[in-house]
Image (tube, rainbow, N blue to C red):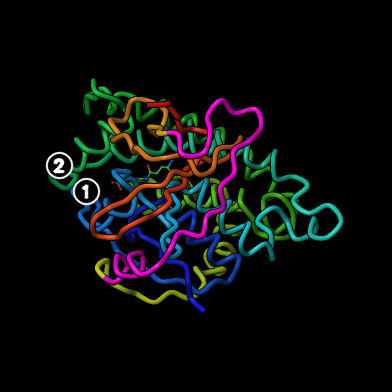
Amino acid sequence: MKQILFHHYPQSPVAEKVRVVLGIKSLDWYSVEIPRLPPKPDLMPLTGGYRRTPVMQIGADIYCDSQCIIQELENRFPVPSVHGREYEGSQAGGQAGLEWGISRWMAGPMFTHGITVVLGAAESLPAGFAEDRGRLYFGPSFDLTQVQTEVAHSVAQLNGQFAWFEETLSRGQSFIMGNNPGLIDALAYHLVWFLRGRWSDGPLFFARFPALCEWEKRVREIGHGRSTEIDSAEALTIAANAVPQTQEGVGPTESLSPADLVDVQPEGDGGDPIVRGAVVVLNRSRIAIARTDERVGDVVVHFPRIGYRVTAV
Ligand SMILES: N[C@@H](CCC(=O)N[C@@H](CS)C(=O)NCC(=O)O)C(=O)O
């Protein structure tokens, strides 16, 4: 049965990261296309204000942020693991912690260099797009001219960092962590996909990395699993007809209790809206909150703990 609803748009690199994971796990999913810019009227009832892309919905349980989505996919569909098939069984996910640590660099500083290059080197951008993404990734004092002066520096940084993958892949292994595709491949691929597709010098830049280009073809061939399009109104109906399935659980070292009211917001100063709700899950990797919306009724909205600020109300 298809149960995954994936809210995204085709051009989103962060969504591409998750689409690759859906491919690695060979999953069936429903694709819900959302707008590239706010307002996102059929997404807000589900997330309570979280506006970033992508979001995953399973009934009335909503998963925000690619980190949380991939972890949830790994929990629900553990085989094949995104942490290397060779670890399944006795030492399942033996490298998972280390890989999530590495992911913070790839989704953080490396992605910011990518955004700098794509925004700073663009000849023209859709109306309102540079303003929105500039505010999101560079804060309230965003200045496109300043970003343009940073392009050469960011290219130099990316050149050195992609060379690390080139060095690894030149040793003959098929994927970055070994012979099976996983999380680190999905992360590296979303950066290559973004830069190759949205930066005019991208193809020339990546031609310097022949082993990386061969690996890129292998990741592309994995595909995205099997998706069926449905519209956002139908996704809202699915949530309205479902009951959240998240089990309550608060870690022993937490200072908050189930049902305490909290605000959740991505770290940094991207101008992201706060999402308010009552604690359902709180532990070292997850914060999930219960909220009610007139269009969908009760939902539980999940965020990663890492990278998100949780504040008691
Ligand atoms: N930490 C988030 C970042 C998501 C993110 O910044 N996504 C971009 C799209 S690639 C975004 O939300 N852009 C603004 C938008 O879609 O409204 C994640 O890993 O999911």
Residue that label 1 marks: 37
Look at the image and give the residue range highlighted in magenta: 234-260
* Residue 203 appears anywhere in the view: no
Q: Nearer the viewer, residue 251 or 192?
A: 251
Measuring from the top left, give residue 278's x and y in whole percent.
42, 40
| Sequence-earlier tag: 1 or 2 | 1
Three-letter code for the amino acid on which mark 1 is drawn: Leu
**Ligand 1 falls in quadrant:** top left
Give the main secondary structure of the magenta stretch.
Answer: loop
In the shown orientation, is residue 140 left or right of residue 222?
A: left
Locate residue 25: give its quadrant.
bottom right
Three-letter code for the amino acid on which mark 2 is drawn: Gly
Measuring from the top left, give residue 301's x and y in whole percent.
42, 49
CB within 8 Å, label 1 to label 2: yes
In the shown orientation, is residue 55 left or right of residue 105?
A: left
Q: Which residue extends farthest bottom? A: 1
Other residues around mark 1 within 10 Å, as few (<14) / some (14–19) / many (≥20): few
Mark 2 residue element: loop
What is the distance, in whole Å, between disc 1 and disc 2 at their CAs? 8 Å
Magenta span includes 240: yes
